[in-house]
Structure formats: structure tokens, C-alpha cells
Image (spheres, helix red, strand yellow):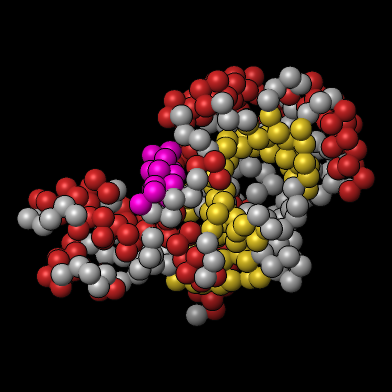
Amino acid sequence: MDIRELSMEELKSYLISGGEKSFRAAQIYSWLHQKLVTDIDEMTNIPAGLREKLKQDYEIAPFEVADVLTSSLDGTSKYLFRLKDGNVIESVLMKYKHGNSVCISTQVGCRMGCRFCASTLDGLERNLEVSEMLEEIYLIQRLSGERVSNIVLMGSGEPLDNFDNVISFVKRISDENGLHISQRNITISTCGLVENICRLADLNLQITLALSLHAADDETRRELMPVAKRYTITEILEACSYFFEKTGRRISFEYSLVAGVNDTPEEAEKLAALLKGRNCHVNLIPVNPIKERDYRKSERQNIIKFKNHLEKNGINVTIRREMGSDIQGACGQLRKSYLEKEAEKEVLS
């Protein structure tokens, strides 16, 4: 078991049960979550005997870098990390004037089936552990030598489908004894798991909730997102209202624009009517095409028209800056191509 799975209190309990002083927990925790060591022997102020016991009972399992692509357009870096069990996941480092933002995966693969996403093409392999989500951030900081200031849980996987581990991750990464990244700088994306949106609201975390909406009516949404067969837009918006009531945090609605499907003036009108009067923000996303689907990116003029229509109706809206478009920037693309190459190697061998 990776020792970074332990909370501070769990670490204290472990030490006390073994006859060690409880103050050692803070020292060990600092090495793990502030200095980001990858070897227990690097903990130089921990007695050698205790280090040996830690190594007997736990491990630190850093990822291997299977591949990294860096955009020549904007400096975005997309990492493919190999986990201890051989699975691979993607993480993305995006550099902005206001700081470094990292988009992390929460699962190996995904079972939500969204039609425009490469992450879900091979289904769900497993959930990521807390220590693995932490390592996505920690390794990128070690590789870049720069602090991460913003985190987006919007990579491979549905974060609220890995609810308990994701919540533990948020608490650990925002802990003042660790990297202490403000919860207000953490965004959790979901395709709309209603029950878990309400569970999240009840925790009253100060994170931003991003709802992957992508359509203003249930029929179109079901075409794009199979999960929409489980929850209607009305049910999802009621859960979002509950989240806002409990936390006071404005909801962000993600809307991927697909040419001829959901980018028409009629769709803009329906979306404006749906969201009118809500304290929300709409993030328009020009869809990044994947070869397995025939969806096309909206024309720039249609994207602008869509944005203008929402603004005329008093809705706060932005067009997401396209990051890493020259490096398989869409979620799941790099992992998918890597798995295909590995499969070809096996056939040839």
C-alpha cells in the first residue's frame, strides 16, 4: 500500500500503535506531501529504524513517464503516466498568466460513454486511488519544477463515479500540511450523477462544480451522452440548484459544440431559456474530433453567434481557449493511441 493513502490522523494512529512518537507523523507527512519525496530513505530527520519499519509496511509508488507531448503552439504538456499495475492515464499541464493548471484523470478509462470523448471508448478499467491522483500533481511539479496553483478533475473518468477517493483527494491536496491548494482553485467536472451531486453539496466544500451539459433538451443530450438516459436535465438542474443553495458556489456549465448537432441558433435559444436567471457560467468548448466518431467541430462563426445569443440573454459565457490542439489534446486521445500501438506490438511479437 502506498503510504500516501494515509491521512495525517491515520499516520499518527499507525505510529502510536507501533510505539513511536506522534510528532513523527507531521515530519513524515511533510516529506510526502510538501517535499514530495519518492524514497522513504530521503526522510533524513526520521530515525533509521523507523524508516526501515515504514519500508516494510508501506511503499511510495511514483509513476513512470510513458510519453510526454508538448505543444509548440501554447506550451501545454500532455503526460502519459504508467501506473504500478501497468495501466496508463493522462494528465495535462496548462500554463496561464495566472498560474499553472493541471487537468487530472480520476479513473483508468470511463464507463459514461459520451460520444465525443476518447476516454470512454474502451470502457472503465478501474478507479484511481487517492495516492495516484496526488501523484499526478506531485510528479508534474517534480518534472516542471513549478508549483501547481489550479486543479481540474476533468481528465479520463467521471470524478463522481469515484466519489470517496475524489473527496479524499480534494481534502488532502488542500490540506495546509500538504500543498495547500485552495479548494476555490479546484474544479470537479461531472456528466450529471444526480445523487452524488447532492452528496457533494452536503459536504460544503468550496470547490467549483462543472456540469457537462452539452445540450438543452433530453433527446439531443441522450444522443451525445448515454448517461442522459438515467437522469433528465430537469433532475440535474435541480441537483445543481441544491449545490448552489448549500455552498453558494456558482455552477459552471460545460457545452461542447458539435457541428450540426447542438450549435444552431435554435439550440442557443433553448439553452438561453433553460439557464436564464441562474447564477451560472457557460463554458463553450469547440469539440476536439476523434477518429472513432464522425462529429465535427463547429465553424468559428457559429461559435461566436452562439456566444452572442447567450450574452444577449444575460448569461455569463466564455469560449474555452483551445490548449494543446496539436498534441492530441482531447481527453483520452493519447492514451487510446498508446494502447493501440502496444496492441500492435503484441500481435507482431
Q: Position of residue 137 (x, y in %)?
A: 48, 59
**Residue closer to the observer: 259 or 93:** 93
- Asked if one can make out residue 181 in the rendered structure from this viewpoint, the answer is yes
Q: Where's the N terminus, which quadrant?
A: bottom left
Magenta stretch, main secondary structure, is: helix
> Which stretch appears magenta?
163-177
- The residue lying at 44 percent from left, 50 percent from top is 180
Q: Is residue 90 above or below residue 197?
A: below
- Which is nearer the eye, 38 or 163? 38
Residue 93 in the image, given as x and y percentages of width and height:
60, 61
Residue 332 appears in the picture as rendered: no
337 sits to left or right of 323: left
Depicted 117 relative to depicted 53: above or below: above
The question of residue 329 being in magenta is answered with no
Total tally of numbered discs in the picture: 0
In the image, residue 46 above or below residue 160: below
Using residue 25 as the reference point, say whether residue 302 is left or right of it. right
Residue 115 occupies quadrant: top right
Q: Residue at 73% across / 32% down in the picture?
A: 215
- The foreground one among 276 and 116 is 276
Q: Nearer the viewer, residue 335 or 199?
A: 199
- Residue at 65% from the left image edge and 61% from the top image edge: 95
Q: Picture quarter containing residue 253?
A: top right
Residue 24: image x %, image y %?
20, 58
Magenta span has 168? yes
